[in-house]
Amino acid sequence: MIRSTHAGRAVAVAGALVLALTACSGGSDGGGEETTGSGGGSGEPLHIGTLLPVTGSLAQLGPPEIAGVDLAVAEINEAGGLFGADVEVTHTDSSDANNASVSTASAQELISAGVSVVVGAASSSVTLNVIDDITGAGVVQISPANTATNLSGYSDFYFRTAPPDSVQGDVLGNLIVSDGASNVGILVFNDSYGTSLRDVVSGVVTDAGGTIVYGAEGQEFDPAEQNFSTIVGDAIASAPDAIAILAFTDQTPLIVRELVAQGWDMSKTYFVDGNLQNFGTEGETGFPAGTLEGAQGTLPGAFPSEEFQERMLEVDPDLTEYSYGPESYDATILAALAALKGGASDGETIQANLAAVSGVDGGEECTGWEECAQLVEDGEDIAYQAVSGVGPFNDANDPSSAFIGIYQFGGDNTYTFSRSEEGEVPQD
């Protein structure tokens, strides 16, 4: 059973919401030694919070991410829970960077509720808005979707199960180059996610002898932009032979319609995780059949198996996409395993044991909660095999390796999996 609470946006938390759960408030510098235990500790029940997009420009990512967390919690609780009690989860809305007050309020609500771990945010800009509050309270933050490179090593209490843009950007840049493009236009919004990814793609293209003809530094657009006639016109006038759209779903349908109106060949267009979605042929985000045929996109993470998709659908039968669902599941399982290994559910214990259970020092490979938890209880070192395909955490608390999926749109403006590329995450 999932014991969950869907919390609202208000900061004020009534007494009834202050659960009988304790989490060490700790300090944000906690970091150092792995806490080893037999896995048989008598810690308090584990309380996980989520800070994921229910509203805003990344709302399409919310359902699969929330389902991934709920699936992991259900799996743990069906196996008897942790420390003799069910794991509890409180869901809150992160919205987006244009509605920063939502994530601020949600973060404070989760801290007040005594969570030990926050899974989220999806947006790197949202995380930058709340990370100091969360990690400063001794709460572990694990993002299933942050990719901005400036978050690598930001805090001892900040981890992510999605790779930084250095991996997706490398795959995207090489995809564009391998498709024969040498003059590349980039439509990028002025957001830490967009500019970080743009910089990596630009480096790959120029290193291969190509040129960024539009979208260099100073040519970003405002995230609140609604009229793309001039922006698209300037990009097309630069004579690109490929265009990458680095934006979220609020702007992307408007950009696509303008590109089509100005005669751009949409088969030479590339999408990324922030705007890769099944647009279809109907509704506000739909386009006429054939509009996106041949266009491609990239998405961090191994393509989820049919079995895992079916398990997610059992949690949320309305799911139509699975983006970052596996990463959210992995974040939750890893947090619980770290608590089990350390024998307590407070943030400091979880932080001290996350790298170990991810397999940074080797150990017995295992999948899922039951198999891994049994090994931990038996005193074994483990190497959790992530559903998302990421490698163990590195010294910056990033995955040491990750897969990037490449997808292609068909005539119905929906995408299908093409192939995956695995990349190592570089460290300074």
Image (cartoon, rainbow, N blue to C red):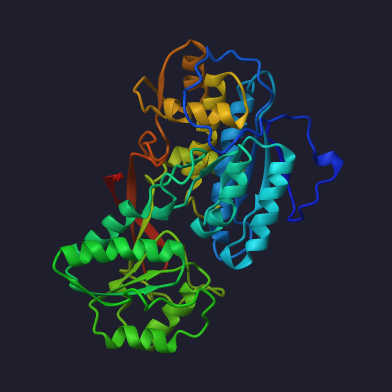
Q: Single out the residue that lies furthest toward the left.
A: 209
**Residue located at (28% from left, 63% from top):** 201
Answer yes or no: is residue 234 visible.
yes
**Residue located at (38% from left, 82% from top):** 259
**Residue located at (56% from left, 75% from top):** 284
**Residue located at (32% from left, 53% from top):** 166
Front residue of 126 and 77: 126
Front residue of 297 and 111: 111
Residue 236 image position (x, y, % from top left): 30, 85
Above or below: residue 61 compared with residue 163: below
Answer yes or no: is residue 318 visible.
no
Above or below: residue 220 compared with residue 326: below
Q: Quadrant of the C terminus?
A: top left
Find residue 67 and report its image quarter.
top right
Q: Quadrant of the N terminus?
A: top right
Find residue 83 and report its image quarter.
top right
